[in-house]
Amino acid sequence: MIRRAFEQGWGFVVTKTFCLDKDHITNVSPRIVRGTTAGNNYGPQQGSFLNIELISEKCTDYWLTGIKELKKDFPTKVIIASIMCGYIEEDWRELAKKAEDSGADMLELNLSCPHGMGESGMGLACGQKPELVREISRWVRDTVKVPFFIKLTPNITNIVDIAKAAYEGGASGGAAINTVSGLMKVKPDATAWPAVGIDKRTTYGGVSGNATRPIGLRAVSSIAATLPDFALLGIGGIESAETAFEYLQCGASAVQICSAVQNQDFTLINDYCTGLKAILYLDGKLAGWEGQSPPTPKHQKGKISVPLYDENGKKLPPFGPYQKKREEQLSKLYKPCKENGGSDGHISNQNNDVDTNNVNGGQIPKVKDIVGRALPRIGAYKKLDNTKQVIALIDDDMCINCGKCYMTCNDSGYQAINFDPETHIPKVNEEDCTGCTLCLSVCPIIDCITMIPKTIPHVVKRGKPGRHHQRSTPFS
């Protein structure tokens, strides 16, 4: 597998975590299952996985020999040997030295496997205690000359404390994050999945994939802000060039990929490389783009949007009898264009053209230039400015009149959206809107709702006790 990954173009690999032969393990089955968090339930592009797989079942010499052979055939590629021991000084010194002597460029000390290994005094049993992490780091630093990283667990109150301990112990950096401990699915018959053996027992496993990305970004950014000289490998839901870019901007110097390959295969490296190049180019040359996505033109279900009104000046929405009136008006507008040899799209052709005024003409940044550049904007809640408020603005030229914004604001928000009972056109009441952004979050049309500065004084409605705030009486 590693050989094929290198041939496909990957720059470095991290081996499956291995141990000394005296600590060898035997896995159970089934052990890697699809997630139920979001996205597709079947096929590629699943939102998450859960596994109860332990470390490698292979013997120590298998990995040491394999690393040596791979370095001989791929001298320019980087191999990181992932190793694990219990809290035993002699074991860490022995295995670290063997991994270094095999030709590994770096080591990863796996102190964070969230299931199984902790019950054997390994993995998470060591990685949740700063004093153990610090001491293990010192043992390994005293034994090897190659750089080594501590694989950090998110299953702890403050991951920065563990990173500090690793840094103080001499670790070169951290790999954040390992999988998140969880229970993925319980079926109606009370059996969980994966279910092992005749009794269909399960255990808490490690959740990986897109569902873990917010946790990974939080970990990487908080560590990078606290320990700027501590190199970081970003891990967790990096399924595209855009998400890799997020980790880099949060302080990671490089990223590791696993679940995305499980969803697809090694050819994903082409998407990461070409995507990152495109994002860097667009970052330096064009304004208004979000990653590889251009500014959204005004449209109605993908077609050019033309605002039309009835005889009373009321906007015509694109559904039901109103759509028929729209088609009649559009036919009259299009007729002169067609008679002159044009097409329907010429009426608003400018919406689909690239705006040359957006060109920045700036220098294209290098990867090193964007590492950590988001950190100045990430920090404590108390540093946020609550004097600059925003409200929602709904673009009725793009609105498909689904009513989702109205429903979520009415039943989960601040009742700040009015919904026309005839045209189904929503309108935000500026006095009631608090800028919570819930409507934007559920709107199915990109950029149909935007958040704009509030132009009237922001008056917080504290809610004084009175007849409208009496306690409800439970049903008898």
Image (tube, rainbow, N blue to C red):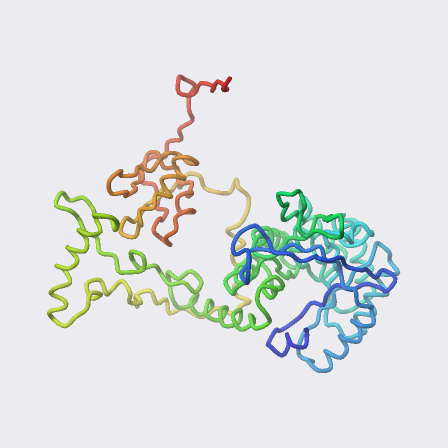
Q: In this view, does 85 lie to the left or right of 418?
A: right
Q: Residue at x 82, y 68 (%)?
A: 59
Q: Tell me residue 242's x, y (percent).
A: 50, 62
Q: In which quarter of the image is residue 135?
A: bottom right
Tell me which residue sits at (68%, 73%) in the image: 1
Please name whichever residue, 210 or 381, is drawn nearer the observer in this view of the structure: 210
- Residue 120 x/y as whole percent: 82, 52
Q: Tell me what residue is drawn at x 42 percent, y 60 percent.
A: 290
Q: Where is residue 219 in the image (x, y as percent from the top left)?
A: 62, 52
- Taking the image as shown, residue 169 lies to the left or right of residue 375, namely right
Side (left or right) of 154 relative to 332: right
Q: How many labels does the image show?
A: 0
Q: Give the answer, above or below, for where 172 lies relative to 199.
A: below
Residue 203 placed where, x, y %? 72, 48
Closer to the camera, 212 or 182? 182
Question: Could you say which quadrant of the image residue 102 lies in?
Answer: bottom right
Q: In the rendered view, would you say 376 is above or below 455?
A: below
Q: Which of 332 and 397 is in front in this view?
A: 332
Residue reaching furthest bottom? 73
